[in-house]
Amino acid sequence: MTATLGGLVAAELIKLTSIRAVRWILLSIGLLVALMMSGVIFSGAVPPDELSTESGMRLVLAHGSLGAVLTLILGIMISAGEYRHGTAVDTFATEPRRGRVLLAKLAAGSAVGVVAGLVAAAASAATAAIWYAAKDVPLDLGSAVVVRSVFGMALANLLFTLLGVAVGGLIRGQSVAIVSALIWIFAAETAIAQLVVSLGRWLPWTTGATLGNSPGDGLLPQAGAGAVLVGWVAVLSVAAAIASRRDVTE
Amino acid sequence: MTDITFDRVTKRFGAVTAVDDLTLQIRPGAVTAFLGPNGAGKTTTMRMVLGLVAPSSGRALIGGRLYTELPFPRRAVGAVLGFDGFHPGRSGRDHLRVVAMAAGIARSRIGEVLELVELTGAADRRVGTYSLGMRQRLGLAAALLGDPEVLIADEPANGLDPEGIAWLRRFLRATADEGRTVLVSSQLLAEVARTADRIVVISEGRLRFDGDLTGLAGPAGPGDADALESAFLRLTIGEAA
């Protein structure tokens, strides 16, 4: 009767499958991706004659990495949700070695992140196929650009789940963690990128978009952006492991 | 049999000293009541036993070991720290499945503890629909999953109706009679007077009294509720005032 790492991971997976919120978030990822993509095509932001160009295809498909906003929140819920609901007491009373709990959460986050990535990729590919057919523009779902976009955005969604797990471990207040993360993505990172252009491409949200094959000038190569994002996950996870030693008073 | 030992335990949160040089041993086979007003340091002390809060100095030990060093923490200690440690969207049974899975406890034990706390009928409902009393029982069920030697409960009578309090009293008595160590906190002397074998009073983080009801009541005898109450108040708010 001891806490094995496998048992801890399985317990984290039960936590995720036993509440409805997780299923709603996964569904929302699909809807968000489909809506944003439809918007960009329907509004004419990408004109029909550009839909068939490589940059046009990349721009449309890259909206799949927007799901990462929601996987980030999901990841934060995996960690900080324990303090919001007071379940941290049971979790750490069962496994007092907190680094192992963080590892289990990252593992469970990977599993749900893969699912989220598949949802985003499927929603993105399906939405593209429908709109391209409606606009009578040929789209080869097996082409290199589509495969790179879809695979990249799936990975971006996965990595942002893990980023969320780390952020939620650092900032225990769930609402504060979510609001901080959103401010970072939609305000701080944009501001930094505009002030110091060369710095922007290294920042997490931008590397996620680049990994999702989003077109743009001066960005890192897709694989390089993925590697940098993995680095962000690693750095923040180590920080979360160190911060996990703090007293549990909630 | 497993005891809890506090060895000169102090906990400071910034400028506030929550627990001040506490030395105490809680023995098996008895119900020990941990009494004190709000903010006396009861909860912090219990969290230190579980390794959730690290003492500023001193050590809290279970059977001579730090909680973090226990090979099977859930078999050694079961704890209920309040009635709000649940996700409202998760069923009671799923909450227990999570704990059992993480601790490596057989699934069959879930049905047993649900029976023990008389919650089987509501086990598949979401915790958000539970009454306060049902949450207390679910907390107890989780604490009992590992069949622990030590049971720690922070204000377990909180929110219970008279029937629930009577049930809790019988339950704690039976648990101690099995030879286990039972430590229960309360703000109210009357709540624990009939159950506790030993009374430990703390206030402002310091040990004020350690003994049985007779010792607390003094010459008037433990049958005198007024004498008990004024003795308790003298020990807590009396000294602060």
Image (tube, coloured by chain):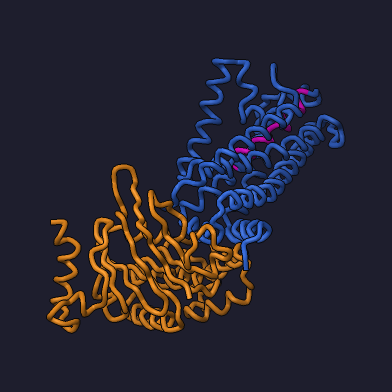
Chain colours: A blue, B orange
Between residue B240 and residue B62, name the one nearer to us.
B62
Where A219 sits versus A20, above or below? above
Between residue A129 and residue A9, name the one nearer to us.
A9
- Can residue B198 be seen at all in this image of the molecule? yes
**Residue A219 located left or right of residue B13:** right
**Residue B194 located left or right of residue B138:** left
Between residue A157 and residue A241, name the one nearer to us.
A241
How many discs appear? Answer: 0
The N terminus of chain A: image quadrant? bottom right
Q: Main secondary structure of the magenta part?
A: helix
Q: Position of residue A191 (x, y in %)?
A: 53, 21
Q: Which corner quadrant of the image does residue A201 belong to?
A: top right
Where A134 sits versus B110, above or below? above
Residue A67 is inside the magenta segment: yes
Between residue A60 and residue B96, name the one nearer to us.
B96
Q: Position of residue B119 (x, y in %)?
A: 49, 77
Q: Please give the range of residues in magenta.
A: A55-70
The structure residue drawn at horizontal position 71% and vertical position 46%, both measured from the top left corner, is A114
The structure residue drawn at horizontal position 68% and vertical position 29%, both measured from the top left corner, is A228
The structure residue drawn at horizontal position 51% and vertical position 51%, both measured from the top left corner, is A81
Residue B128 is inside the magenta segment: no
Q: Position of residue B24 (x, y in %)?
A: 34, 65
The structure residue drawn at horizontal position 44% and vertical position 49%, both measured from the top left corner, is A247
- Can residue A17 be seen at all in this image of the molecule? no
Q: Position of residue A227 (x, y in %)?
A: 72, 31
